[in-house]
Amino acid sequence: MIELKPMSDADFESYFAESVRSYAEEVAPRKQISFERAFADAEKYYREIILPHGLQTPGQFLFNIVEISSGLKVGYLHAGEKSDGTAGDEIFGWDILIYPPYRRKGYARLAIRSLAENLKNSGYKAGHCFVWDDNLGAIHLYKSFGFEPTDKKATSGTTMTVAFDRFTAGIIENPASGV
């Protein structure tokens, strides 16, 4: 079992640095630009558009994913309203990461399920996320919840969407894992 715990200031700083670096690593080869330029662009986008007030940015939900029995942080999750004001009652999944030693154990599935249920109960009607086309594991995971591709991007990725009234619990692939 997991719990979504709000990030502390220190957690946020670590998340921000890792998220910007990771995004730049994905974008640089896809856009055929240097890592340095991709990093600068990503940092500017995060600081000015997605999280202009850091951890205190309204409409943003930043959590550590914590394994309850051990208290270990197994990853993080960031979802929030789009900063352009177009989201209304919809939410965008900006980022989810499960640390390497904890992958393929069901933690991402549990975190997405928990977040979606909380967002639905808070009045949000739909969720969106962007997935790189070569991230087949993530595509499979999101589809198991009812997400469907809605917008193909030129940058080798797809936006996927689910209406929370059609959100499913997802199929537990490895119930023996205890997660």
Image (spheres, rainbow, N blue to C red):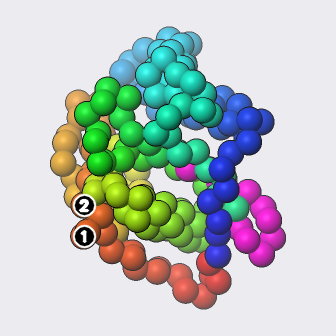
Point 47% across, 80% down: residue: 173
Q: Which amino acid does label 1 sit on?
A: Arg
Q: Position of residue 125 (x, y in %)?
A: 28, 57
Q: What residue type is labelled 2?
A: Ala
Q: Tell me the residue that label 2 is attached to.
A: 163
Q: Can residue 49 be seen in this view?
A: yes
Is disc 2 surrounded by few (<14), some (14 to 19) or many (20+) residues within 10 Å? some
Determine whether the residue tagged by mark 2 lies in a helix, strand or loop.
strand
- The extreme right residue here reads 70
- Magenta-colored span: 67-77
Q: Tell me the residue that label 1 is attached to.
A: 166
> Do residues under tags 2 and 1 come within 8 Å of each other at their CB atoms?
yes
Q: In this view, does 163 lie above or below 82?
A: below
Q: Is residue 94 visible?
A: no
Q: Where is residue 88 in the image (x, y as percent from the top left)?
A: 28, 42
Q: In this view, does 131 lie above or below 49?
A: below
In this view of the protein, which residue sits in the foreground, 86 or 176? 86
Residue 1 sits in which quadrant?
A: bottom right
* Residue 74 among those drawn in magenta: yes
Distance from disc 2 to disc 1, alpha carbons, whole Å, reads 5 Å
Q: In this view, does 166 lie above or below 95?
A: below
